[in-house]
Amino acid sequence: MIIDFQKLTPASRYFTMVQTIVPRPIAWILTDNGNQTLNLAPFSFFNGVTSRPPIVSVSIGKKSPDEKKDTWRNIEERRHLVIHIPQVNHAATVSQTAATLPFGLSELDESGLECIPMDGWPLPRLKGLPIAFLAECHSIVEVGEGPQGLVLAEIQHAFIDDACVVPGKDDPNTRLELDISKINPLARLGGNDYAGVNQSFTVKRPD
């Protein structure tokens, strides 16, 4: 089967892409609504871009042709965000926080999640999540006909749960090693499907 993307509708292109670009990491992003409430939403068009500087990318769409999603708007206006890596046990809550709410309402009110303040940072992080990147907006590039907002965010600090660190391999200035089974990251597939990491293995590089 050869699929000509130029002949597909935008929806068909999307459904084909999300079922073939798998699994995808999930960025569970916390931002400030600007009205003393916090916004929380998941995005799976997410990945690393460069380590010098440490930048990740997140692609964010619109609620409607004339209204940006709250996360996009908040990052654009206030610049700070906290990107969490959810675990498999968070799947239902991640899905719940994907629902579109009127601007200014907080997904945290219904999720049951708690926040922990971060010293010297304007936003808290979610309690019980093994990894959180405290980041600032580097730039936002509008892409495509939507357009989609391609957010480039620079990581300023990273919270990593000590339980996920391999004993004796805890120096980030040499080679920090993490136990993927302890992180137990949730990955996105197509449709309503998610996946976990059931098995990991190492392939040695050729000499």
Image: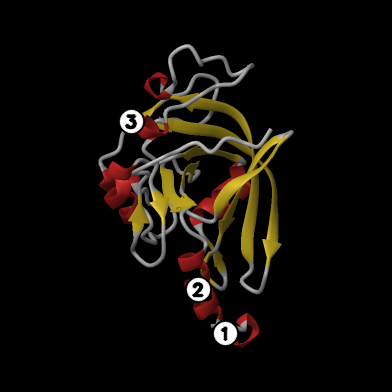
Numbered tag placed on residue 166 in the rendering:
none
Instruction: Give above or below for 122 relative to 94.
Output: above
* Secondary element at tag 2: helix
| Badge 3 density bin: few <14, some 14–19, many ≥20, Cα 10 Å | few
Q: Secondary structure at mark 3?
A: loop
The residue shown at (57%, 35%) is: 204
Residue type at mark 3 is Gly
**Residue 109 visible in the picture:** no
Determine which residue is flagged by label 1: 8
Residue farthest toward the top in the current orientation of the protein: 168
Q: Position of residue 190 (x, y in %)?
A: 41, 65
What's the mark number on residue 128? 3
Tag nearer the camera, 3 or 1: 1
Q: CA distance from mark 3 to mark 2?
A: 34 Å
The residue at 41%/50% (across/down) is 187
Q: Residues within 10 Å of mark 1 (few under 14, many from 20)?
A: few
Q: Quadrant of residue 10?
A: bottom right
Residue 108 visible in the displayed image:
yes
Q: Residue furthest bottom?
A: 7
Label 2–label 1 contact, CB within 8 A: yes
Q: Nearer the viewer, mark 3 or mark 2?
A: 2
Q: CA distance from mark 2 to mark 1?
A: 10 Å
Amino acid residing under circle 1: Leu
Residue pointed to by mark 2: 16
